[in-house]
Amino acid sequence: MKRALAAVAVSIALLWIVGIASGHADLLRVLVTGSIGSTFAIEGTLLKSVPLLLTGLAVVIAFRAGVWNIGGEGQFIAGALAAFVAAPLGTIVAIVASILAGALWASIASLMRAWRNAPEVLTTILLNFIGIELLGYCVNGPLQEASGKYPQSEAVAASLPQLGEIHAGVALALIAAIASWFLIYRTKEGLRLRATGFNPSAAHYAGINVNAQIARGMAISGGVAGLAGGIELLGVTHRLFERFAAGYGYSGIAVALLAQLHPLATIGAAAFFGALVTGAGELQRAANVSSSVATLGQAVVILVLILFGSMRSRTS
Amino acid sequence: MTLRIDHVTKSFGATRAVDDVSLEIEAGEIVGLVGENGAGKTTLMRIVAAELAADAGTINVAPPPSAARTAGGGGATSIGFVHQHFMLVNDFTIAENLALATGALPREAEGIIAGSGIELRGVTRRARDLSVGEKSKLELIKAIARKPEVLILDEPTSVLTPYESDELFRVMRNIASEGTAVVFISHKVREVIEVATRVVVMRRGRVVVESAKMTAEELAAAMVDTPRGDFAPVTETRTGEIVAIVGVAGNGQRELADTYLREHPRARLGFIPEDRTRDGLVAEMSIAENVALVGDGRRTPQLIEQYSIRAKGPDQLAGALSGGNQQKVILARELDRAPELIVAAEPTRGLDIEATRFVHEQLRRAANRGAKIVLITSDLDEAFALADAIQVIYRGKLSERMTPGEASSRVAALMAGVA
């Protein structure tokens, strides 16, 4: 916790220095007002935080089972595609479909593990490429809007209930975070999941079917990432298009790392990165500074965090 | 060369692990460093090897080591330390592990092994596939190959058979005669008496006895500070039976244990794995969570009490416990459920006298309660002390059942495969 906060502080200081050195002395101020300075800004931050929170949770859950799920991007897309197809049956069905699709997409990696012991780090990332291309095919082919003008779908047939700009997905994401914490730390399933992640050998001798346990962890993880895609479609974009996933799957890894792989801390980490992305958007509009400064900030936080980690392990 | 330990003190939190210890160790000596679990033996030696910093006191070597000897050695004074826990690269072969440790080439491994006087075959096998006994031999070869001035062995015989132990003692005497000071940490009174030229007994962080001549009784008495009253006699209403499977490490013991694991529902099987740090406990989880993995986590406070586990409480991380206490947690977890069948692989490895007696008593009790017990052990004393029947495992095959009386004359030959 202390380490994560210190990493955030150091990277904010670095951003400030970068701002001054590049002649944008108000860079930090714009970032802050652009992310939390107005109702509009806060809404933007909240909306950006939701997918980050869910993809971050997906990474946390899989990590607890001892697996790096790098496939959030693909599972996110699978969830959104399923939600789009199921939307005519109603919002709830669409949400459930997104969870199932994400879980199934992640389970392909588990099957490959069971069949040929293929490592998830590789298979999930390769499944991302397939997911991205599949989405590209869909919005240029079977799911393309009737006018055929842009590579995007029609508006989705259902949407999440909204309160102003804020959709019900915010509540769903928070519930998912608390539920993940409860699952991991308060249930027998979570106990076995963590034992498998920490020491698969001891888990095996404690009578746990390690491969099945990892597969369940991956399915839950994928389900959460799929839910992120469903919520993004039904609450924010309302359409599918080629760059729909926008890197949320990968950013989830950074969120999980900043949260030190704890499900509740993921809420704070997602809010921070959500604010960074939203503030950077304002920076581009107001000060003509490329919004990729958000990506820079993200990278710096994680690098500083890793640096602190290695410093600590060396001194202890 | 003289290694001089001068008023060394080291605390971990509130516990004073090493308390004002002074000791001199001369070249060519074999010092038996004995004491119960947690007496401070390993901590003291880790300070000597510069793995830990002392809170107070100094370690000196006179005369200072020459440059030639320090080069490539471990630590400034060329100290070899064979740890109780393995420090091997699991994915490397024996040859690669040796190359890594010594700076030699992998193809020179066989020569290094031959030079050490220790028998270890198949240098292209990966460390992960070795038995615990073989891993411990490899660690020893690694340390000897660096020709240390001081060689520290932490419980080296706990995973060895009597034959392998004798082999080890021969190696120890050899390298001592070449001028290395050997420190042999052990709980096994008989072995210490046999091999050590001087015995140092530690108790609660202090050196309590230092002597060149001690009988086994004197030594055992010096190690424990509680009166050694006999255990209450076990009621002889046996419905269960203890079968000991004895053999040299690496003859299929692990596979045998795994068979039981596969063929019996875990809930009704008590299982004490051979390698407790790897297979027994999840170090990163609490004692209560480790108990809950197989049994009822809520019973942890009672279990800590009943098995006198030295822990701060049920929420302490299992990895923070000493080896002996980790073993007690496993034992408590597995026996508390009163399973019908108990498979115990090397259940007393690395434990001190008191803890060993405690484990034996618990197994005996479980048998009396009606449980069937399979005791897989390389410690013949243990087998003969506990078993109602004995079988020898050799190259994956079990001999016929023998009574302890029949076994006493045949076990050695069967274990060596010459019967």
Image (cartoon, coloured by chain):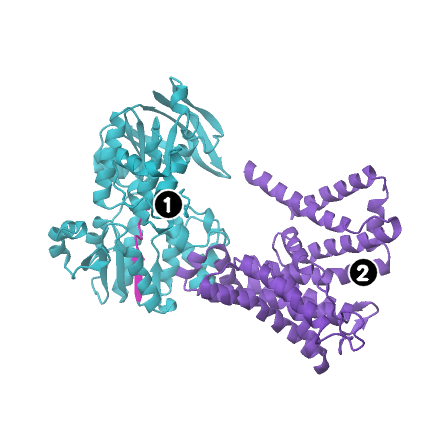
Q: Is residue A106 left or right of residue B66?
A: right
Q: Is residue A158 left or right of residue B282?
A: right
Q: Secondary structure at mark 1?
A: loop
The residue identified by callout 1 is B93
Residue B70 vs B250, above or below: the answer is above
Q: Are marks 1 and 2 on the same chain?
A: no
- Name the foreground residue: B31 vs A279: A279
For the point 72% across and 41% down, which residue is it? A10
Percent x, y for residue A312?
58, 40
The dot on residue A44 is 2
Percent x, y for residue B114?
26, 36
What colour do you see for chain A?
A: purple
Q: Is residue B123 left or right of residue B89?
A: left
Res A20 seen here = yes
What colour do you see for chain B?
A: cyan
Amino acid type for the residue under numbered disc 2: Gly
For the point 53% across and 63% down, which residue is it? A190
Name the quadrant containing residue B291: bottom left
